[in-house]
Amino acid sequence: MGRTFRIKVRMRRFRRQHPRIAFAIRSFMIFSATFGGAYGFVTGSRSENSGYDPNTFAIGASFLFALACLGLATLSMRLRFVNKRMRKLAAHNEALIDRNWELKEAEERARSLFEQQGDLIVLRDHQGRITFANDAYCALAGQARSALIGTRFDFDVLEQGDSARESNGTRIHDQRISTSSGARWIAWREGFVRLDAGQPAELQSVGRDVTDRTETERALSDARDQADAANRAKSRFLAMASHEIRTPLNGIIGMGGLLLDTTLTPEQTTYARAVKTSGEALMALIEELLDYSKIEAGKLDLDQRPFALSTLIEEVTELLAPRAQAKKLEIAAYVDEQLPLEVVGDAARLRQVLLNLAGNAIKFTASGGVALLVEPGIWPNEISFLVRDTGIGIAPEAQSRIFREFEQADDRVARTYGGTGLGLAISERIVKRMGGRITLESEPGKGSTFEVAIPLAPSQGSAGQTTFPSPDLAGKSILLVAAGIEASLIARRLERWGGQTCLVTDATVAEALLPERSWHAVLLDRAFGSDITDRLGEAARAHATQRLVLLTPSSRHEKLSTAFTGFLVKPLRAASLAARLALAPEIASPDLAPEPAEPASVRPRTSGLSILVAEDNEINALLMRSLLTKLGHRVVIAVHGEAALESWLAASSAGTPYDLVLMDIQMPQLDGIEATKRIRAHEAATGGHHTPILALTANTLVEDRYACFEAGMNGFLIKPLDREKLDEALAGLAASRQLTV
Ligand code: ADP
């Protein structure tokens, strides 16, 4: 079957390829057959031996005739069939001619589109010869197409930009080229295209003139560089200016403080106090501006040191407690106990953010209170700090605006409360720099909650440590008679320690509840008023088995009812509460034990240091002398670095070295850095006593601090200095001196 088909195919192909030979063979065969048949028939009928029979002849003739008719009929059918196919072919042919026209038209359109493109289009063969160039390319080259085709023409490249390659192999690059109409920037896209299957691929380059865009970008980038430089200059200027302003301001505030310590008439006291508060307000403003300019100039360097979370939060609450209590507001904090004890980060900057948020919360709250909650965040190692208040709230349309610099929610409110509108802008930038976010939820009239969520990794050494042992209150009943934010936080903490806490916010209910059972401890809040708490205290005495504690704002010196076994100062420190509850039963031998020791009370007092103060500003020198003398130290003033060095050398060689040098940084003749270097060099050469040197500076730029440490200083004190700051700095020194002596 296959073989027959192959033979047929071959014969057809032969007929197609050699139609004449096929025609000749076919004609010859038809002629031979016809002739052979006719000849045989005629000869056969004529032969004598043929036994001619007219009947048979007639039959034969009619058979032949029939055969001829059949042949003719077959031919006619074949002819009709062929005609039909011919008509079909003709119709097909016409369709093909139409299609051909359409294709030609489309090609024409595509070609004219291609040629009239605004973009430059050029095709080159594998030897770099141009095979096609559109009108735009010819116009830019300043030559006719016919002159370009077949040449290796290319533009002169004046500047070559970066080049990149796309995943499909297309190369993209920018070039600045020299053209007949001047230098132009062209963005090229180049790739290989195969136009004909039998031909090698051609390089197609499509270029877009981006001169305007590139020049605008360059102008923008130049403008940005200039703005950056101006910004840096501005922040340097601000730093310098603020330094210059701080120095006299330091004098004003310090002298105001000293004046207030003298005997003054009430009127004079009012004026002196006004001078001091105005100076402090101005100092706060300068500090905010300086901070802002530092952040703007990208000079915010973050520290990465371990710090205790609860200490930081307690510091913030305690610092703000007097302000809150002055407005009869509550302030309380709660640090979730699942959080690591110590985390690594910039505690000072975090404190600044929290102080701003909690400070605002107190400022914009008239009744109720402020809570600081610290909880695990939504991401691993993220910690969420919530500052919640019951204040005036913020209108929805102002909520995003207030994070912008110098923006306040409401001008009328701003006039009442004051402020610069910089605090939140600074806080947000610090938080972002720490890799965190700050969000706000607020309803006017109901209060606001600011949330700061930042990544803070636990410190390596703190795993498994605890600041204080938690008291075991499992199964013990505790009655907490208190109201407000702090009450619920204390209750939460007591429950964490296992206590069965009964929180009562109404004194009458508490009185009724007292006889219900015997209470391990009863905690009463002074906020109900001294009469009520004293009465409740007396009533509770019979039902409290171990202790009866008064929670009081800060009036430690207030006379307590003898019913109480002790007191705790609000805002409550978790450690103090734990220590108080862990004490031996106090009811049996009631005495007014003082609150468990706090760091401040164990701090050693400073005692008579001999101090050299290098300070060129007369007023500041006078201020330092007064402050230090009042703190019980002996002071020698040197008015420039040279004098300080001489005085230090003289004291050392006389065998009475100074205990401390307070060194101003900017001084005439010899500045503080240089004077320190010389002192350290002398100490190294003689192997003598190492004198602690603290820088005295109004400049808070980080590079200045580095310079201080590099010169060999032990630390620095930032102006303006007040008695507390100075006392604190010197206390540590005096303590270490006592230890080493
Ligand atoms: P300042 O407090 O110096 O005006 P901030 O940037 O700290 O600047 O705050 C901007 C504004 O946001 C405030 O003026 C106040 O209108 C609004 N605001 C901030 N915190 C609170 C808050 N806790 N309750 C109500 N309004 C607030």
Image (tube, helix red, strand yellow):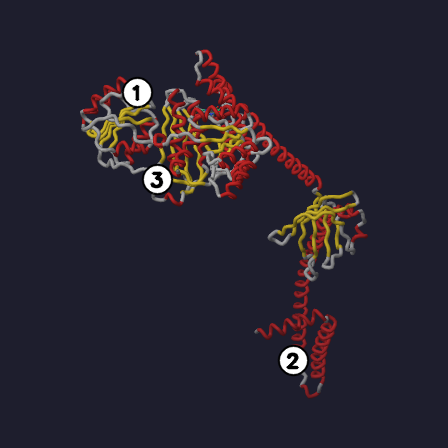
Numbered circle sitting on residue 56: 2
Residue topped by disc 3: 338
Residue 349 appearing in the image: no
Quadrant in the rendering for residue 617: top right
Whole-percent x and y of residue 132? 75, 53
**Front: mark 1 or 2:** 1
- Mark 1 or 3: in front is 1
Q: State the SS at label 2.
A: helix
Q: Is residue 152 left or right of residue 451?
A: right
What is the CA distance from the residue labelled 3 to the residue labelled 2?
128 Å
Image label count? 3
Which of disc 2 and disc 3 is earlier in sequence? 2
Upstream in the sequence, badge 1 or badge 3?
3
Amino acid carrying mark 2 in the image: Thr
Q: Is 567 in front, or is 71?
A: 567
Residue at horizontal 44%, vertical 40%? 305
Looking at this view, is 592 or 572 the one in front?
Answer: 592
Q: Nearer the viewer, residue 360 or 133?
A: 360
Which image quadrant for residue 119?
top right
Foreground label between 3 and 2: 3
On-image quarter of the C terminus? top left
Instruction: Name the residue type under label 1.
Output: Glu
Which residue position holds label 1? 558
Question: Label 1 vs label 2: CA separation?
Answer: 161 Å
Amino acid type at circle 3 is Gln
The answer as to whether callout 1 falls within 8 Å of ligand 1 is: no
Q: Residue furthest bottom?
A: 49
